[in-house]
Image: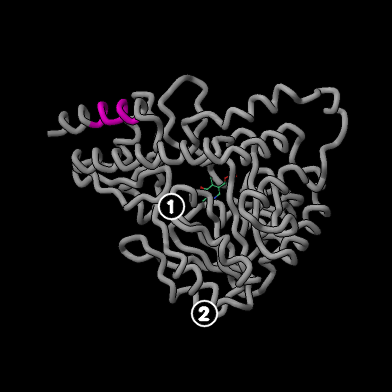
Amino acid sequence: MEAFERNIRKVEPYVPGEQPRQRVVKLNTNENPYPPAPGVERALKELDTADFRLYPDPACSVLVDAIADFYKVGRDQVFVGVGSDDVLSLCFLTFFNSDKPILFPDITYSFYKVWAQLYRIPYECKRVDEQFRIVREDYYGENGGVIFPNPNAPTALYEDLELVEDILRHNRDVIVIVDEAYIDYAGPSAVELVDRYDNLIVTQTFSKSRSMAGMRIGYAIANPKLIRYLNDVKYSFNSYTLNRASLVCGAEAVKDRAYFEETVEKIKATRERAMERLGSLGFSCTRSSANFLFATHPDCDARELFEALKREGIYVRWWDSERIRQYMRITVGTDEEMEKLFAFLEQYLSKGE
Ligand SMILES: *Cc1c(COP(=O)(O)O)cnc(C)c1O
């Protein structure tokens, strides 16, 4: 090791799902199989490229206003960023500054560990139970903050707001972040708790239910004071985070509630059919409240199946990680995409017998 390397900030990076260039059945990164709301295309066509020479609005007002209207919260309760990864990373930097460890589940979004390491935040992983459920009592002790996704990823399990509120009640002295990347496919959102718990931050994203992973838009909803703290850090870091196209396209996407609800319902319907079908093929899945399935099969090795699917041009996600090595995470695609998956699985399983 060269001497200068000793002072380099080193981190074991998050490994994103593959983004293959060729046409494949892509069920590996939980994108939406349907296009964004029609208004997005119109807004993009109406953009005046001459304006690209100018910096975008640092306050992101058109988008913040659209989100505030949709969720019926104040404009001063909304913060937007370049995907919720950007928002979450800024939240770690801003709110997790204690010498005590922050807490999150052992099976969860793998970025949390990366940010904790990058920002040198002490952390402790709390074991989810044998059914992959969050154990609320694990979050009662002293800590430097709490974060968990609801629904959790990659388990797809949704915890009732009663559990979320219980964890909030036991953690009035620290910030609790609920990462709701998949909430639109699940049940009630913790956004409704924001006015009662001033230590709560809820983050959501345009990447899944709003079909805009490529535009990179995420947001946080919290009380105005926490939003101000977030903005202070953002303005000390990079003031112009969202570009002009993302701001107007994002605002258009939020305004079309009907299209949003329709595509969410389509995905939920496909999910239910897919769970049944996988069940009839001998898989067991967790009760999914997201746009993906977490599935295991008693007679086949998940890694081998993952590799076989990939050779067939069907991409799903698999982790070489302790408790979930025999599981695959399968994004809910269109019905046609799911049929291709099932056709292959049928053939694969019949060969094994
Ligand atoms: C997809 C995802 C995110 C981040 O998505 P962005 O594309 O950065 O908005 C955050 N948390 C979880 C649990 C996710 O699955």
Where 320 sits versus 36, above or below?
below
Q: Residue at x 42, y 43 (%)?
A: 291
Pick whichever, 339 or 29, lies toward us: 339
- Residue 257 placed where, x, y %? 56, 41
Where 272 sits versus 225, above or below?
above
Tell me the element at label 1.
loop
Q: CA distance from mark 1 to mark 2?
A: 28 Å
Task: Provide the major secondary structure of the magenta segment.
Answer: helix
21 sits left or right of 64 in the view: left
Q: Amino acid at mark 2?
A: Gly
Q: Per the image, is 322 magenta? A: no
Q: Per the image, is 343 magenta? A: yes
Q: Residue at x 42, y 34 (%)?
A: 27
Q: Amino acid at mark 1?
A: Ala
In primary-sequence order, the first of circles 1 and 2 is 2
286 sits left or right of 175 in the view: left
Whether residue 268 is visible to the viewer of this picture, yes or no, is yes
Based on the displayed image, in which of its 4 quarters is residue 226 positioned? bottom right
6 sits left or right of 337 in the view: right
Query: How crowded is the residue under tag 2: few (<14 C-alpha within 10 Å), some, or many (20+)?
Result: few
Q: Residue at x 82, y 41 (%)?
A: 57
Q: Which residue is mark 2?
A: 141
Q: Which residue is mark 1?
A: 186
